[in-house]
Image (cartoon, rainbow, N blue to C red):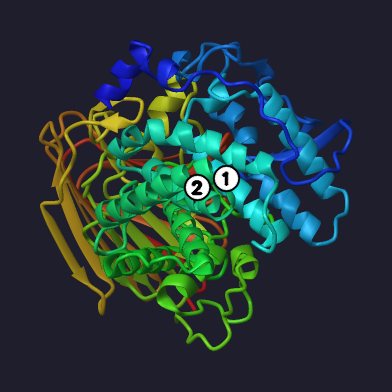
C-alpha cells in the first residue's frame, strides 16, 4: 500500500500507463442504435433511475453533481472529491452490469438489445480513453468491466465464433490497467484481490483463445498471474470454516459468484484445474453462505459492509435473495443442489451446467464458525446468528456480540447496515459503529476506537466461546480497550429465544440496543409487544427502557428509520431478555 501511494505521488503510474486514444468498435455488433431520450439503469442492485441513453458516465445521479476530474489521469484524482458525494455513485454505471444483462435480453429474443448495448459501449469507450478520468481509478472496477464483457460475449456467442477485434483490444487495455496495481489490491486482503485475479485469469485466457500474437503472449502471462493470485487469495482469505475475510454476507456472495464463474469458465475451456485445497475452500464458502440465509425468503443478516454489488445477476433477481448464488456455488463446488427444480442462477444456463441427478444439499444446520466469528442456531421456524468478538482481518464494523433473530421469514432483530462509504460525518460514525448493531455500547463509545474511514483499532478477541448445538446454546464475551466487559448468552426456548447479557467495567452507563423489524410496537412495564411477538426485559440492577427510532439501510444509498428498544443500565449487572413469538411452529 505504501509503495502504491508513493508511486501515485511521484507520477509512476502516469508514466507506466499513459493516457490512450479512444478505441474503435465494433465490440459486439455492427448494428448501433441511435441515442434516445432516456432509459432506466439499476444502481446498487436496487435503485431504478431514469438516465439519458447513453448515460452520462461522470455524473452522480443521486445529487446531479458531475465529476470535475474527467480530464485528468486516474492516478491524479482524489478518492473523495468535495461536493461530488460517494464516488461509487459515479462508478456504478461503468461497472458494466448492464452489458451482460442486455446480452441476456438479446439471447431471450429482444432484437433491439444488442444494438443498444453497442451504442452505449461505443459511447463509453469514446468518453473514457485508457487511464483518463475517474472510471479508470479503481482496478476492481476495471476488473468488473472485464468480467461483464466476457460474460456478455459468452451469452451472445458462447465461444462458437471469434469475437470482434474491438472487444479484444478493450479487454487488453483493461488488463494492462489491472496488472499495474494488482499488488495494491492484494495488500487489502478483501474482495478487490479476488476480483482482479479473476479478471486476469478469465480475460487472459480469452485473449489466448482469440487474440493476435501479441495479445496471446500477454494473455498467457495475465492468465498465469491470475491463477497464482486466485490460489493465494482463496487460501488466505477463505478460512477453514468457510468464512471470508470481510465479515460481510454480500461481499461473501460476491466472492463465491466470482469463484463459480472462474471455475465454470475454466471447465468450459478445459484448462488445468486449480489445487484440491482451492476447491475445498470454495466449497466451504458455499456452505457458509447456505448456513447464513433464511431459506424461506433467501435473505440473510445485514452483516458488515454492503455496497450493492451483485455480479452476473443477468435475470435481475432481488438483491437480498441469496438463494441463486447458494445454488450456483453448491452445484459447482459441492456437487449438490440446494433447491432441486425451484431455484436457478443464470450462469447455470449460460454454461449448460446441469442440476439433474445432483443429490440435495439439505437444510442448513446449526453451526459454530468460530474462526470467522459466527454462531448460527437453527430451529424449525428460524434461526439466531451471534457475531462473535473474533477479528482475524480488519473489521469495518464494531459489531461484537451483535444478535440477529429470524422467525418465519422475518428478520425481527437486526443490523442497521452500511448506507454509504462517503457521507456526512454523523452517518459515517453511526453505521459502522456499535450503535447500529443489536449489542451493548459502553459510555457512548464504540467497542473499538475508530482509526479511519474503514478501520478500527484495538481489535477485540473472545475470552470464551461455549457452544452446544443440541441445546441450541452459545456464549461468548470480551473486554474492550478501556476495561468494559460484555458477555452474552443466547439460548433457544420453547416460545422463542432467551438472551442474557453480563455488563461490567463501565463508568457511567451501558446501553443495549435492539434494532427491531418495523411493526405496531407498544412498550409498557418492561414489555415491548406487537401482534406477532413480545420482548420481555428483566434485570437485577436498575434499568430503564425506551422505544426510539434509528436509521437502517438494507440497500446501499437507501435508509429508513426502524424502532429500537433501548435498555439503559446505570450500574453493572445482568440483563435477561426474552423474545417470545405468538407462533413458534
Q: Answer above or below: position of 92 versus 584.
A: above
Query: Residue 173 location in percent, x, y?
Result: 54, 33
Look at the image and tell me whether residue 505 can be seen: yes
Would you say the residues marked 2 and 1 are in contact, meaning their CB atoms lie under 8 Å apart? yes
| Secondary element at tag 2 | helix
- In the rendered structure, find residue 254 and report the number of the disc placed on it: none
Residue density around tag 2, few if under 14, some if 14–19, many if 20 or more, within 10 Å:
some
Q: Residue at x 38, y 72 (%)?
A: 378
Query: Residue 221 location in percent, x, y?
Result: 39, 46
**C-alpha separation, residue under disc 2 versus residue under disc 1:** 6 Å
Q: Residue at x 34, y 12 (%)?
A: 9
The quadrant in which residue 99 appears is top right
209 to the left or right of 368: right
Q: Which residue is drawn at 23% across and 28% down?
A: 449
- Spot the residue most to the front: 213
Residue density around tag 1, few if under 14, some if 14–19, many if 20 or more, within 10 Å:
few
The residue nearer to you, when weighing 324 against 78, is: 78
Read off the residue under disc 2: 216
Query: Residue 508 location in percent, x, y?
Result: 20, 29
Q: Answer above or below: position of 445 versus 497.
A: above
129 to the left or right of 300: right
Read off the residue under disc 1: 212
| Secondary element at tag 1 | loop
The residue nearer to you, when weighing 334 against 512, is: 334
Q: Quadrant of the N terminus?
A: top left
100 to the left or right of 105: left
Q: Answer above or below: position of 528 versus 378.
A: above
Look at the image and tell me whether residue 555 can be seen: no
304 to the left or right of 326: left
Amino acid at each position: 500500500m505504501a509503495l502504491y501511494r508513493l508511486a501515485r505521488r511521484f507520477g509512476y503510474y502516469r508514466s507506466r500507463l499513459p493516457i490512450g486514444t479512444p478505441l474503435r468498435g465494433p465490440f459486439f455488433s455492427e448494428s448501433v442504435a441511435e441515442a434516445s431520450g432516456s432509459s432506466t439503469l439499476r444502481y446498487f442492485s436496487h435503485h431504478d433511475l431514469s438516465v439519458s441513453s447513453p448515460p452520462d458516465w461522470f455524473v452522480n445521479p443521486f445529487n446531479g453533481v458531475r465529476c470535475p476530474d474527467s480530464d485528468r489521469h486516474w492516478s491524479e484524482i482524489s478518492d473523495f472529491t468535495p461536493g461530488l458525494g460517494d464516488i461509487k455513485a459515479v462508478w456504478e454505471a461503468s461497472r458494466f452490469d448492464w452489458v451482460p444483462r442486455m446480452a441476456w435480453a438479446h439471447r431471450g429474443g429482444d432484437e433491439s438489445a444488442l444494438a443498444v448495448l453497442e451504442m452505449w459501449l461505443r459511447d463509453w469507450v469514446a468518453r473514457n480513453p485508457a487511464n483518463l478520468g475517474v472510471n479508470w481509478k479503481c482496478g476492481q472496477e476495471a476488473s468488473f468491466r472485464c468480467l461483464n464483457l466476457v460474460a456478455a460475449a459468452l451469452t451472445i456467442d458462447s465461444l462458437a465464433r471469434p469475437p470482434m477485434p474491438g472487444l479484444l483490444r478493450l479487454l487488453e487495455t483493461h488488463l494492462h490497467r489491472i496488472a499495474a496495481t494488482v499488488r495494491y489490491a492484494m495488500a487489502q486482503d478483501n474482495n478487490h484481490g479476488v476480483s482482479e485475479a479473476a479478471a486476469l485469469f478469465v480475460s487472459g485466457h480469452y485473449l489466448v483463445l482469440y487474440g493476435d500474437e501479441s495479445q496471446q503472449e500477454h494473455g498467457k502471462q495475465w492468465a498465469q498471474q491470475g491463477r497464482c493470485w486466485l490460489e493465494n487469495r482463496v487460501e488466505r482469505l477463505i478460512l477453514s470454516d468457510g468464512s471470508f475475510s470481510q465479515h460481510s454476507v454480500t461481499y461473501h456472495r460476491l466472492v463465491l459468484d466470482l469463484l463459480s464463474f472462474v471455475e465454470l469458465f475454466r471447465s468450459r475451456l478445459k484448462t488445468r484445474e486449480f489445487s484440491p485445497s482451492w476447491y475445498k475452500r470454495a466449497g466451504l464458502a458455499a456452505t457458509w453462505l447456505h448456513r447464513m440465509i433464511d431459506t424461506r425468503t433467501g435473505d440473510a443478516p445485514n452483516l458488515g459492509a454492503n455496497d450493492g454489488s451483485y455480479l452476473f445477476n443477468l435475470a435481475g433477481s432481488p438483491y437480498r435473495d441469496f438463494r441463486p448464488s447458494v445454488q450456483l456455488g453448491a452445484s459447482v463446488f459441492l456437487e449438490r443442489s440446494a433447491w432441486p427444480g425451484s431455484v436457478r442462477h443464470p450462469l447455470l444456463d449460460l454454461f449448460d451446467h446441469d442440476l439433474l441427478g445432483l443429490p440435495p444439499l439439505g437444510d442448513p444446520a446449526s453451526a459454530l464458525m468460530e474462526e470467522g466469528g459466527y454462531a448460527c442456531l437453527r430451529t424449525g421456524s428460524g434461526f439466531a446468528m451471534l457475531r462473535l468478538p473474533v477479528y482475524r482481518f480488519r473489521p469495518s464494523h464494531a459489531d461484537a456480540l451483535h444478535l440477529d433473530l429470524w422467525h418465519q421469514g422475518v428478520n425481527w432483530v437486526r443490523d442497521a447496515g452500511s448506507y454509504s462509504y462517503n457521507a456526512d460525518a454523523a452517518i459515517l460514525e453511526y453505521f459502522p459503529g456499535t450503535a447500529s448493531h443489536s449489542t451493548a455500547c459502553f459510555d457512548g463509545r464504540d467497542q473499538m476506537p475508530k482509526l479511519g474511514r474503514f478501520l478500527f483499532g484495538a481489535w477485540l478477541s473472545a475470552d470464551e466461546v461455549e457452544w452446544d448445538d443440541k441445546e441450541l446454546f452459545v456464549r461468548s464475551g470480551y473486554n474492550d480497550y478501556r476495561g468494559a466487559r460484555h458477555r452474552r448468552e443466547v439460548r433457544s426456548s420453547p416460545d422463542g429465544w432467551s438472551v442474557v447479557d453480563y455488563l461490567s467495567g463501565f463508568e457511567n452507563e451501558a446501553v443495549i440496543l435492539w434494532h427491531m423489524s418495523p411493526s405496531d410496537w407498544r412498550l409498557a412495564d418492561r414489555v415491548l409487544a406487537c401482534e406477532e411477538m413480545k420482548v420481555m426485559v428483566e434485570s437485577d440492577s436498575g434499568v430503564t427502557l425506551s422505544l426510539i427510532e434509528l436509521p437502517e439501510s438494507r440497500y446501499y444509498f437507501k435508509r429508513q428509520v426502524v424502532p429500537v428498544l433501548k435498555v439503559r443500565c446505570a450500574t453493572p449487572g445482568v440483563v435477561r431478555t426474552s423474545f417470545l413469538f405468538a407462533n413458534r411452529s
